[in-house]
């Protein structure tokens, strides 16, 4: 049974989905295009690719660490305040990235500031609102809709970012994006939960933060979900950041890279939505295992087949179906096992594992490229990790965790 207070959820399904999707569309749309800045920025300053990759790695690990605390604050005081703070930091970080004259400034702006901003404007915080305001039988579907919105943001924003770089130059393009990030603030008002404004949480918190934390980390299935999410982060961030340069190294035009990233975003709209729908009907562990196994196969075929614009577009479309489809399945499984009272925080911890993987994927891409002159080793690591993640998701138990009387989970199996 859902342990809610007497008042029903204050936000309608339409309001939660439209406003949550709009926030994720903008925040994820901007960040998916950062790979387009690798070559113009590093060439302008005479930096190595590792320098840019390390700044992106810092961004991802900062996002993961800050996401835990953003989730705690959102669970306690509501997502609205957290999203506003994240939007302001996003604008500041993008403008700072445009003016970065040293690697340190790049790491502080593109790395730390934008990383904290993403923690406050993306999935963990928005999924907390969805979990509190959606009935359990529709939760996986709703999370799939929000994840699809992030994918649509990639499809929408990456070509726009490419055009901004072409027409304004890379610095002014970043400044323009900084102003665009502020559009998140008025949309966030639609996620303002009245119960938080009254100082009253909409879900009864029968556990302290520490109790919820220790319970989750002692639970084997939570550990396995974290390990799988680590692989997801490694794969998608390596591909998202380094694929434009990989394609250019192999003689393909920058437009091919822009279209490839856009195709990933477009097809991920369908992949994440389908994942959310299937999560209402199938065991999420089976969905996750299939996604990771399929990624390993698709990456292997891509690097072993002759490279051409056609092969890039086919890879991008198929990979797009698998790109963020892990997100609704993983977060719905967490809500199903542990309930929604601490969903943003627990989602933040799982996402930290994702971001540790992201850190290694993006940094190793630059590190090994600078030392070997190609990305071959990282591609093979991504394949091996896909097989590993598929195997470890199979034993996940999705049923609600058993607790002592008076400490029932906030969600029962869907």
Image (tube, rainbow, N blue to C red):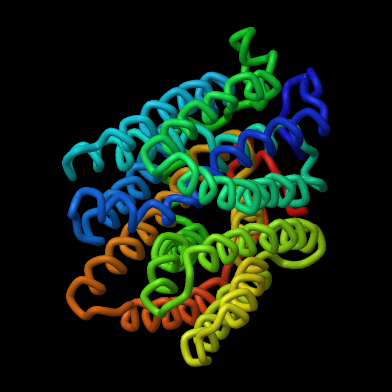
Q: Residue at x 40, y 80 (%)?
A: 250
How many circles with numbers are drawn on the protein?
0
Q: Nearer the viewer, residue 230 or 218?
A: 230
In the rendering, at what x and y percent does residue 359 appear? 33, 57
Q: Residue at x 80, y 39 (%)?
A: 135
Q: Residue furthest top?
A: 198
In the rendering, at what x and y percent does residue 238 appear? 40, 65
Q: Nearer the viewer, residue 231 or 133?
A: 231
Q: Quadrant of residue 25?
A: top right
Image height check: is 380 above or below 402?
A: below
Image height check: is 122 above or below 96?
A: below
Q: Residue furthest front?
A: 167
In the rendering, at what x and y percent does residue 409 appear? 64, 42
In the rendering, at what x and y percent does residue 134 appear? 77, 37
Q: Is residue 168 visible?
A: yes
Q: Nearer the viewer, residue 307 or 54?
A: 307
Q: Point out the image quarter for the N terminus.
A: top right
Q: Is residue 71 visible?
A: no
């Amino acid at each position: 049974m859902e342990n809610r207070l007497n008042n029903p959820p204050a936000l309608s399904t339409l309001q939660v989905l439209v406003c949550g999707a709009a926030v994720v569309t903008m925040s994820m749309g901007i960040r998916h295009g950062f790979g387009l800045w690798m070559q113009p920025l590093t060439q302008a300053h005479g930096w190595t690719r590792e320098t840019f990759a390390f700044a992106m790695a810092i961004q991802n690990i900062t996002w993961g660490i800050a996401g835990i605390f953003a989730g705690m604050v959102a669970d306690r005081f509501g997502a609205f305040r957290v999203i506003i703070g994240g939007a302001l930091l996003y604008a500041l970080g993008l403008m700072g990235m445009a003016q970065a004259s040293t690697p340190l400034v790049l790491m502080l702006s593109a790395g730390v500031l934008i990383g904290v901003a993403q923690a406050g404007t993306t999935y963990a915080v928005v999924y907390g609102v969805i979990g509190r305001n959606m009935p359990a039988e529709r939760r996986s579907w709703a999370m799939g809709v929000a994840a699809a919105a992030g994918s649509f943001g990639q499809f929408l924003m990456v070509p726009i970012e490419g055009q901004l770089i072409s027409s304004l130059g890379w610095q002014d393009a970043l400044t323009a994006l900084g102003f665009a990030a502020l559009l998140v603030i008025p949309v966030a008002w639609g996620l303002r939960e009245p119960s938080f404004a009254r100082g009253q949480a909409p879900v009864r918190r029968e556990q302290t933060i520490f109790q919820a934390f220790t319970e989750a980390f002692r639970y084997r299935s939570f550990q396995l979900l974290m390990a799988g999410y680590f692989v997801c982060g490694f794969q998608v961030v390596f591909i998202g950041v380094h694929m434009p340069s990989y394609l250019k190294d192999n003689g393909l035009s920058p437009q091919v890279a822009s279209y490839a990233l856009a195709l990933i975003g477009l097809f991920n709209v369908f992949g994440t939505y389908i994942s959310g729908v299937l999560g209402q009907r199938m065991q999420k562990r089976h969905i996750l295992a299939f996604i990771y196994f399929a990624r390993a196969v698709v990456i292997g075929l891509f690097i072993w087949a002759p490279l051409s614009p056609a092969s890039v577009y086919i890879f991008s479309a198929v990979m797009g179906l698998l790109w963020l489809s892990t997100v609704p399945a993983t977060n719905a499984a967490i809500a199903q096992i542990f309930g929604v009272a601490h969903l943003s925080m627990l989602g933040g911890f799982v996402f930290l594992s994702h971001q540790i993987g992201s850190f290694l994927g993006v940094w190793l891409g630059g590190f090994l490229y600078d030392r070997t002159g190609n990305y071959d080793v990282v591609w093979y690591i991504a394949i091996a990790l896909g097989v590993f993640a598929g195997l470890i998701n199979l034993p996940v138990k999705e049923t609600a965790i058993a607790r002592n009387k008076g400490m029932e989970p906030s969600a029962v199996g869907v």
